Each structure stands twice: as structure tokens, then as C-alpha cells.
Image: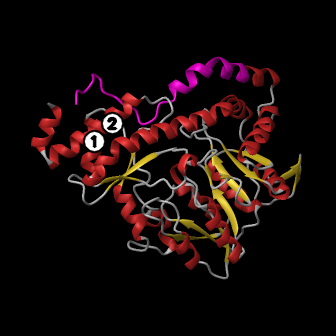
């Protein structure tokens, strides 16, 4: 493989996205500045309506970040102290923090090692008389199996509250992320498939009461100005400026998701031969509905070099990578009080040592994907078969 100079393949690149939209984004920002409705303004109302409709729901409630969307959303769904909420151990800590902020007791369960999604059989075994809700995390852009999830919830009369922070318009079995549960949380962190120019989040729901309570909770618990009905109220409102920017981007989201899926398919084809070398992709069971917020491979124990060494070699070749996530929630120092320890969730723990996120963004070219894979092939075969590598190099 010939290494370009400089050979940088960024993990994510937002410049391609913002450059063609710059004039439109500047225009809506100017409009908000002229109108002066910086908090709970018209652009926010418009975006809440449009994004909720895109998810197949009736109401959207814009909040300050995805974590707040989880915490306030669970509160609005009636989750409170004394309630147990089931969630996977292999998720970003925001999911767990959201449950804790709602006052509930988080109950962690293991995941499916092949898909990295919550293990619903393990979730069912964790249900107790105090269990009120389950939070499926649509990790990496792939939805948890909707029908199996709904059947589980129906059998035990559980609230389903989706963590869809990585799953904007993801689909599976006729469902769109956000439309399955009583409520769902989204994040608009800049690197998300639909990203703001800073932090932002949204709760979507089809339940009018949930939406009404969430609107109060985000605004100091006020149902109307200076009339406060929710003692757990806080200040967490999606800025009008951010909503205006997201309004510009929303019509492009479907196309961006399709571009991500096409890039993932090329990755799949090119990486398939590396399966015999112990590098396998996290399995896609959702077909074209997987929107690939992240493209993740597993560097398994049969790989001739470890994940750390592979990542080091890719960095040297100018390829930026990530790990999502290196420490499962139950092993984080902040949550030792939950009573879990090493060995509780073997699949999540094994995955945390295997997973490697490769560059993924809609502006990525096929040539860039090929370069990433070629760098991986060179790193692996340099260890497995240096002679064969020389033959491959020509």
C-alpha cells in the first residue's frame, strides 16, 4: 500500500456537510437574530413538529442535550424513586446517568456479542416486581428488534423508553426509531447523523400528557409563565438558534443515512476476507434500516495482532479510529455503588476489549474506505505472513 502524504483519514469530517449549507445556515441564524426569539422560539416549535413527524410520532420536546432527553423523558413517563429500569451495560454512560437523574434504580443487563444490542432474554430474567421500564439502546444506528422488545414489554407491563441518540431515522421491521416506545430520546451532538452546532437533544412521543409534562420539566417545571407544577423542573431547552440549524439539515438526513449505509456495505465487502484473520464486523440484523452512526469491527482473539497494536498501526498510517466504548458502565468507578463487578456481564466485557470504530461519515469516498481497509490488511499480514504481504505489495 502506498501511503499518501499526509495520509489522514479523519474519524469524522463535518466540513463536507456544512460547506454547501453555509449560506442557508447563516440565513436562518440571521433570521433568529432579527426576530430575537432565542429561547423557545418559532424555529424550535417548527423543528419539534418536523422531527417528531419524521420519527412517526406526534410530539417533540427540544431539550439541552441527549442526557436530559433521557432523564426528563423518563420523569415525564412517570418513572420515579423506587422504580427499576433495565438498560444494557454496554452503552454510553449518558443512558445510565439519565436513569439515575430520574430517581430510578438502574438494572444493567448483558448484550448480544454479535450485534452489541441489549440481550432481551437477559433483560427478561432481570425483571422484578419493581421493574417499571426498559431502555433499549439502538446502538451504533441499529434498532433493537421491535417485535421481540414489544412482546417482552407487553408480557410484563413495562414502559419502553428508547435511547435513540445514535439512531436518527433508523428503521427495522416497519418501525422507525422513536416510534416504538412511550417516549424516545435523541441527541443532536455535532457528530450525530443529525447534528447541531453544539449540544442539543429531543424527546419524542405520541402521548400528549408525556409531552406536556416534559415541556414543563425543561422550563423550570412551569406549565405556563411563573406557574410551576413540576418540582423536578430544570433549565434545559434546545436553543432556537440550534433548532434553526437543525431545520436546515433535516431534509438531507435521509440521504446522509443512505450514504452511510452504502459506505458500510463497501466496508463489509472489503473486510469480509479479514474474517479468517479474526476481524469481524458487528452484525447488521436490520438491513437497510441500519443508519451506521458508527461502523464497528471486532478484533477477536484469533487476530494475529491485538486491537491496541492494530489501532497504533492505523494511526501511523494516518487513519483515525475510536472505541465505543472501552469500559462498560458497570465497571466505571462512578457506578461501583450499583454493586456490579468484573464478570457480571461477560459479553459486554469481551466486546469492550474487541471493538474498534472505523472512519464513517457521508462525505467519505470509496477511495478512503479502500485506504482504511488496505491499511488494516497490511497491519494484519505484516504479523501473520510477512512473505505473503510482500507478494501482495508486488
Is the residue 300 above or below the residue 81 in the image? above
How did the renderer colour the structure?
A: secondary structure
Does 264 sit above or below residue 123?
A: above
Q: Pick whichever, 119 or 209, lies toward us.
A: 119
Which region shows up in magenta? 1-29
Residue named by callout 1: 376
Mark 2 vs 1: CB contact within 8 A = yes
Compared across the picture, whether 290 is left or right of 230 comes to left
Under circle 2, the secondary element is helix
Residue at (9, 42) in percent of width and height: 387
Label 2, on which residue? Answer: 372
Residue drawn at the location 42% of the way across and 49% of the way down: 296
Place of residue 84 in the rendered image (x, y in percent of width and height, measured from the top left): 64, 73
Which residue is rendered at x = 51% and y = 40% of the image?
261
Q: In this orientation, does residue 377 appear? A: yes
Q: Is residue 50 above or below residue 272?
A: above
Picture coordinates of residue 136, whole percent (x, y): 60, 61
Q: Of helix, strand and loop, which one carries label 1? A: helix
Q: In this image, 20 relative to 213: left or right?
A: left
Horizontal and vertical percent for residue 89?
Answer: 49, 65
Amino acid at each position: 500500500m502506498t501511503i499518501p502524504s499526509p495520509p489522514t483519514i479523519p474519524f469524522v469530517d463535518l466540513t463536507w456537510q456544512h460547506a454547501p449549507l453555509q449560506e442557508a445556515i447563516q440565513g436562518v441564524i440571521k433570521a433568529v437574530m432579527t426576530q430575537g426569539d432565542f429561547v423557545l422560539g418559532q424555529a424550535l416549535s417548527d423543528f419539534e413538529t418536523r422531527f417528531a413527524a419524521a420519527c412517526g410520532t406526534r410530539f417533540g420536546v427540544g431539550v439541552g442535550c441527549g442526557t436530559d432527553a433521557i432523564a426528563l423523558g423518563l420523569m415525564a413517563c412517570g418513572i420515579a424513586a423506587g422504580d427499576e429500569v433495565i438498560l444494557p451495560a454496554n452503552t454510553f454512560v449518558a443512558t445510565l446517568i439519565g436513569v439515575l437523574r430520574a430517581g430510578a434504580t438502574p438494572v444493567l443487563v448483558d448484550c448480544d456479542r454479535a450485534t452489541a444490542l441489549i440481550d432481551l432474554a437477559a433483560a427478561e430474567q432481570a425483571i422484578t416486581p419493581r421493574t417499571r421500564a426498559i431502555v433499549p439502546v439502538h446502538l451504533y444506528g441499529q434498532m433493537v428488534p421491535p417485535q421481540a422488545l414489544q412482546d417482552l414489554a407487553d408480557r410484563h407491563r413495562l414502559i419502553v423508553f428508547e435511547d435513540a441518540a445514535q439512531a436518527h431515522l433508523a428503521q427495522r421491521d416497519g418501525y422507525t426509531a422513536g416510534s416504538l416506545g412511550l417516549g424516545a430520546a435523541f441527541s443532536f451532538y455535532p457528530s450525530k447523523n443529525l447534528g447541531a452546532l453544539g449540544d442539543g437533544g429531543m424527546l419524542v412521543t405520541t402521548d400528549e400528557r408525556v409531552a406536556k409534562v416534559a415541556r414543563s420539566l425543561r422550563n423550570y417545571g412551569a406549565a405556563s409563565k411563573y406557574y410551576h407544577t413540576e418540582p423536578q423542573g430544570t433549565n434545559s431547552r434546545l436553543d432556537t438558534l440550534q433548532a434553526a440549524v437543525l431545520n436546515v439539515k433535516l431534509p438531507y438526513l435521509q440521504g446522509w443515512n443512505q450514504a452511510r449505509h452504502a459506505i458500510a456495505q463497501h466496508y463489509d465487502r472489503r473486510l469480509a476476507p479479514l474474517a479468517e484473520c479474526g476481524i469481524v464486523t458487528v452484525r447488521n440484523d436490520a438491513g437497510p434500516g441500519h443508519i451506521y452512526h458508527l461502523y464497528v469491527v471486532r478484533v477477536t482473539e484469533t487476530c494475529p495482532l491485538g486491537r491496541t497494536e492494530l489501532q497504533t498501526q492505523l494511526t501511523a498510517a494516518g487513519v483515525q479510529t475510536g472505541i465505543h466504548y472501552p469500559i462498560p458502565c458497570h465497571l466505571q468507578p462512578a457506578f461501583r455503588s450499583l454493586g456490579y463487578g468484573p464478570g457480571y456481564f461477560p459479553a459486554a466485557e469481551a466486546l469492550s476489549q474487541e471493538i474498534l470504530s472505523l472512519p464513517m461519515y457521508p462525505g467519505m469516498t470509496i477511495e478512503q474506505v479502500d485506504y482504511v481497509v488496505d491499511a488494516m490488511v497490511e497491519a494484519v499480514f505484516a504479523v501473520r505472513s510477512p512473505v505473503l504481504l510482500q507478494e501482495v505489495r508486488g
